[in-house]
Image (spheres, rainbow, N blue to C red):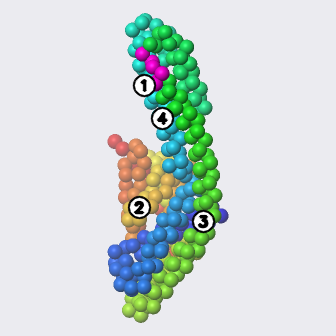
Amino acid sequence: MKNEVNDKYTSYDVFLTFINKLTNKALITAILETVAVLALIDLTFGQLTGAIKSQIIVPGGAKDESDKAQEALATTMNRIGMKAWAMADDKEETDLAKQVKRPISYFTGVSKNLCLTRAGALRDVLSNNASVFTNIKPADFTEIDAKILDFKNKRNKPTNVIKDAKAAGTNMIPKYVNTMDKAILKLYGYVFGEYAEDKPEFVEAMALAKKVGHTGVHHTGISAFISEALHPELALLGVQMKIVELDISADSSITGFASISAIMPDTYHIEFSFAGYETQTLVVKLLKGRIAVMNVLMVKSV
């Protein structure tokens, strides 16, 4: 199911690239009835994007809520700890000074549970040595306690929110896919009725885009074997292959192959880039229903 959805999404993206080309968009929007359909396609594609992202990406807002609470606690502990360190240093309490001088990363660069443990331990040091840390006031302890409590309340929230987001996304994906398919078919119907006789080439091109978008079948694409120029038998892992005009990219696998499919037939600039190697660009003409196969030799930068 996941692969089918990803195929659908990629093919919708190809269809949107086609209809949003300036010349194509002008022809389509010249038909009054298409305006509402285009708006529906844009809206639904955005909704589908959000639903798919919820399956594979930690929602930024949910993650931030917990992380921000951890960072706020770390900042407070660092600031109050530095204030305590200054007092201990003045009184030549070397051991205590070392115990309270903690960088922010001491609290953020660890697990949430360990962060709480370290914050609690530092609070205890401050509380148990009040005679040394005379500049640490009740308000400081109140702030520390408030930040610890806030972080305790929020540290597990991302897990629950992510689960809910994934469930919601999974439930809505079929609806969005169905809406996209129907809208694409309706848009094609308007275009066919208007231009079938006067602009058959345009209608045929859109028919191919509609077929790719509607079925998710990959007709046309690029496959490249990427290797080291001085050692052609040495496959390179992680080289980015990018179709410049479409801003679509794929990285080479451990076998040296990178592939992009579901591309409209056209002439494209294909860019290959990799750290430590010269970026090179090749021009490729993709034919309908064909996979263009290339051997690319990467040259090391001087």
Considering only order in the chain, which callout, 1 or 2, is on the residue closer to the N terminus? 1
The numbered disc on residue 71 is: 4
Reading the image, the residue beneath label 2 is 247
The label nearer to you, 4 versus 2, is 4
Check disc 2 and report its element: helix, strand or loop.
loop
- Give the residue displayed 62% in from the left and 54% down from the top: 164
Check disc 3 and report its element: helix, strand or loop.
helix
Q: Residues within 10 Å of mark 4 (few under 14, many from 20)?
A: some
Type of the residue with mark 4: Glu
Considering only order in the chain, which callout, 3 or 1, is on the residue closer to the N terminus? 1
Q: Let me know if residue 92 appears in the view.
A: yes
The numbered disc on residue 172 is: 3
Q: Is residue 36 above or below residue 154?
A: below
Magenta stretch?
135-140
* Residue 50 screen position, x and y as percent: 52, 60
Q: Residues within 10 Å of mark 3 (few under 14, many from 20)?
A: some
* Residue 11 screen position, x and y as percent: 52, 69
Q: Is residue 201 above or below residue 273?
A: below
Type of the residue with mark 1: Arg
